[in-house]
Each structure stands twice: as C-alpha cells, then as structure tokens.
Amino acid sequence: MPLPSLPRLTRAQAPLTCEIDAVNEFGEVQAVAIPAERALTVYVDKRELVTLMTLGAHPELLVLGYLRNQRLVKQATDIESVTVDWDVGAAAVKTRHGIENIEEKTAKRVVTTGCGQGSVFGGLMDEVDQIVLAADAHMTQAQLYTLVNTIRLKETTYKSAGSVHACALFKLPAQAGGDPDMLLFVEDVGRHNAIDTIAGWMWMNTAPTLVASRTALPPEGALRLRPGEAGSAAPAGGEGAPTLVASRTALPPEGALRLRPGEAGSAAPAGGEGAPAAGVSPTDPGLEGLVFYTTGRLTSEMVIKSAQMGVPMVVSRSGITQMGHQVAQVVGLCAIGRATNKRFVCYSSPQRLHLQPELAGPKLRARATEA
C-alpha cells in the first residue's frame, strides 16, 4: 500500500507593503510604506474554522503550521491540499480523512497575548508534559552572537515599513564551533503567525520519514539565488518578497529522495519500503541542532509552539513571561531573551548554552557617586 504524500500547496502571492501619504513633524506630506494586513478565512473540508489577520507572504505554510500548532492535525500526510485564493481571502484545506471530533476540539478557545489577540483551541497546557526535546542539544555563546548579528544585518520589511514581527529558524553545524545557518526567515503582523509559518515549512521540509509529493515542491526555477547569498534562495518574483529565505542546506541531499515503482508523481526517502509515514519528532535528523529566533516576547504560547516543533533552544530580542518560563522549565527548553549585540539573559536550561564570558567584553559596573 503506497504511503500518502505531503499536501499539495498553491503559491498565492500578495503585496507585502503599500504606500500612503502621511504628514511628518514639519507639516510636510511624504510617501511612506506600511505593511499590508489582510484577512484569510480558513475552511477545513468546507467548514469555516478561523480568520487569520496576516501579512500574506506565505499563506499556505501559515495555514499548515496553524493546524499543526493547534494540534488539530497530527501529521502533514493527514492533509491532501491547501488552496489559497486572495481574490476572496480564503484558504481551503482538504484533509484525507477529516478531523476527528473537530467540533469538540474547537469548542474551547483561549485568547493569548499574541499580537492581534492570538488564540489557541483547547487547553493551553494540554499535552505539554508529553513533549520530549533532544537532551544533548546545545549552542555556544559565540554561535548565539553570530545568530543575533545575522538577524541584525537582514534586509527586512520591518526596516522599510515597520510594524511587523519576525521569526527565524537556524540550524547549528554538526562540527563544534561552526556558524549557525539561517534556514528560514519570516515576517508577519503577529509573531504567532510567523512561528506558525515556520512550523508549516518544517512539516514540508524537515521530516525525513514523510513521502514528498513532487507537486508539493516548488517548480523548477522557482527558487533563485540572491546576489551575495550563495547558500540561500528566495521565491522568484522580485525583491518585493523578502520575508522567506530558505537555505538549500535544509533540503534533502541529491539522491535522498527516489521514485517508487509505479508512483511517477511522488518520492520517498531512500531506505526501504518499510519506512512509515510519521510526524516530526525530536529524534528526526532534520531536527538536530535547531534554534528558533523571534523578535517578540516569549509567552507560554510561543514556548509551547517551539517545543511542539521539537526546537530545544529559543532566542528572543524581548523578554519572557512567568508562564512562558514555567513551560520552558517543564519541557527543558533553553529560553534566551534580551538578546541584542552581546547582551542576553538565559532564563532556563542554561546547561544547553556553553558560556564564553570572555566574548562579552568588559563588564560595566555602576559606580556610587558622592553627594
């Protein structure tokens, strides 16, 4: 019996910014760019589920990751297709066998602290105690500094228009001390949208036990190298879509996928017909050495979603909440906040961070002054 393939995704596109006339402090009219914000209503098997307010850069991945992080779908192969049409502002999700007890699962809603009032279905802490993160995952202080500097140098919608959050996924090299590689960079009007988009991308790219349908992959030539970024690619279609950078190192190596006899439209990981389709787990090779970065605060929602994705280390430009800290401690997640330049605070699981205090520079001490 053939294994199911990954879902088919459309590649809907929409402008990320628009230009308006505004008045500055001198009373002068000037043209300024502002981020787009549009409604995307998600239908699952023709049943309306939710409306997401989003920048709209990668709506299919956003929907896929939303279903994953809401724990409505256990694995990517449960979904047959995600079709987005911006003309009507809708995303149609077709599952293979429906979502069991969907009314019960979506009856309880928790409004979170996410930008734009994010929400999660069911109990926020449900299944947290079942999450197992890789025990040996770690990062050096030097790698943390490199990661933060990579974000600082990134050309972003935030720099040109502001008012958006960013999230990124990094992979640490197998050899000790190497620089982290940015696999994905996503911006959206809410940080929960950005992390859901990354979750959707991970489902489509880093689960080695899943069968990958050729129709789910970008068409030949759809990815092009950017000048000066030899190791990364961006969706074709001009410089106006800078919010997703997918590193080629995240893709399966040449020959890792092979066609099965009689299945011209799909491919399976080499290694025998007996490899089962399964969701991503912390033991998957594609999840080793992953670090998640966000510009937003580390709330319980963000920490839980990171842990559900199997990512054991999270870095934020902002801080952490009490509940976010409690969840991080329960699951053994290394939460690092206030990460700017060479400053940071490690809130939990400091054993995952190999400290190199000599890299931080001279420590500034407050001096008492005489009256």
Image (cartoon, helix red, strand yellow):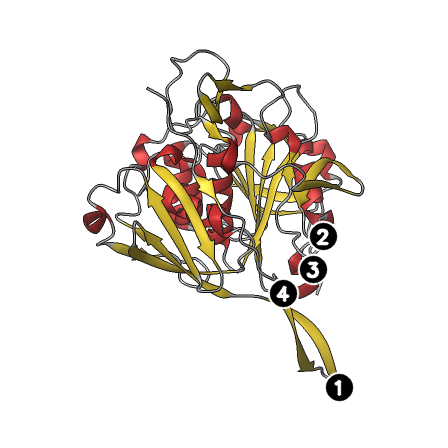
Q: Secondary structure at mark 2?
A: loop
**277, 173: nearer the viewer:** 277
**157, 126: nearer the viewer:** 157
**Chain-order first, disc 4 or disc 1:** 4
Q: Amino acid at mark 4?
A: Thr
**Chain-order first, disc 1 or disc 3:** 1
Q: CA distance from mark 2 to mark 3?
A: 7 Å
Disc on res. 17: 4
Disc on res. 155: 2
Q: Residue at x 22, y 41 (%)?
A: 100
Residue extending farthest to the bottom is 27
Q: Are marks 4 and 1 in contact (CB under 8 Å)?
A: no
Disc on res. 159: 3
The reply, left or right, for residue 207 in relation to residue 77 is: right
Q: CA distance from mark 4 to mark 2?
A: 14 Å
| Vertical relation: 260 (above or below) 352 | above
The answer to whether residue 342 is seen in the rendering is no
> In this rendering, which labeled residue sits more in front, label 4 or label 1?
4
Residue extending farthest to the right is 228
Residue 355 % position (x, y):
63, 30
Q: Amino acid at mark 2?
A: Glu
Q: Are marks 2 and 3 in contact (CB under 8 Å)?
A: yes
Residue 166 % position (x, y):
58, 52
Residue 192 % position (x, y):
46, 52
Q: Residue at x 41, y 13 (%)?
A: 273
> Which class describes the residues within 10 Å of circle 2: few (<14), some (14-19), or many (20+)?
few
Q: CA distance from mark 4 to mark 1?
A: 22 Å
Q: CA distance from mark 4 to mark 3?
A: 12 Å
Q: CA distance from mark 1 to mark 2?
A: 27 Å
Q: Which residue is mark 1?
A: 28
